[in-house]
Image: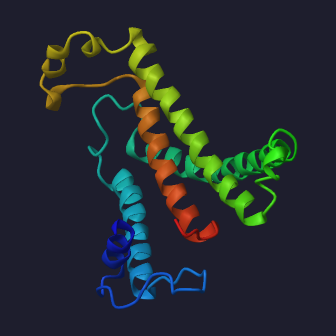
Amino acid sequence: SFARFCRCALSLGGCSGAAMPKGTGRIVIDPFTNGLLTTLFGLEVVAVFAVLLALPGALPAGCPLTGPQAFAALAVTCLALFPLIGLVKLIAGHACALLSRTALAHLGDPVAKVKTRNKLRDQSWQLTIHSAMTALEAYILFVDGGGEHWLDDYRSLWTPHPHQQVNSKRSVHLLYLLQMAIWIVTCASHRFLEERHKD
């Protein structure tokens, strides 16, 4: 099955041991693989911040920030996302518990179990961030600066050549900054803060 293939691929040592021993209900993660992937993630984050500080031409043309300013903005955004995640999870947990006890009571209060509520709270952050990023992307494509003209004229995608294009929309650079911060924080959150799930 696909799930077995994924477990085998992540174990790096073949399929000799199952990722979840039968009957235990516990997820067993290969410590070597876990350490390797965590180290690679840490190195990638360090590399992103180092590039912002050390390489003057690393940012795309038209970016309103310098490298050190982008470094500071990314660091501040990452730090601001942690309490935002907590707030979203707190609100979602209370809202879903209330909804479960009232509107979904005829189903037997589906969010009554702590494990189910925690899983729902963890997923609420993903729903919130994907909805917010979709709204920002729609704003960039259809509203900011009159929208993107290449949506109506696909030939303009190549005029000027993509290597010579300069995007001076601040919203595009904000999107890049937010996406980078979200991926860094979400990765760290999944690895160090959230409860492990079977899925």
Residue at coordinates 37% horizontally, 51% vertically from top-left? 52
Q: Residue furthest bottom?
A: 16
Q: Residue at left 64%, top 56%?
A: 122
Rendering coords of residue 155 (x, y %): 14, 15
Measured along the vertical axis of the image, is residue 112 above or below residue 64?
below
Q: Which residue occupies the foreground of this view, 79 or 64?
A: 79
Q: Is residue 71 visible?
A: no
Whole-percent x, y for residue 10 in the image? 35, 76
Decide if residue 176 is in sight here.
yes
Rendered view: 99 above or below 29? above
54 vs 153, nearest the viewer: 153
* Residue farthest along the front direction in this orientation: 106
Q: Position of residue 123 (x, y in %)?
A: 61, 52
Position in image of residue 138 (x %, y %): 45, 23
Q: Is residue 186 left or right of residue 32?
A: right
- At x 14%, y 17%, the residue is 159
Quarter that holds the N terminus: bottom left
Camera-nearest residue between 131 and 156: 131
Q: Nearer the viewer, residue 4 or 52?
A: 4
Q: Is residue 40 above or below residue 19?
A: above
Residue sitting at x 44%, y 85%: 30
Question: What is the count of numbered marks?
Answer: 0
Compared with 96, 138 (above or below) is above
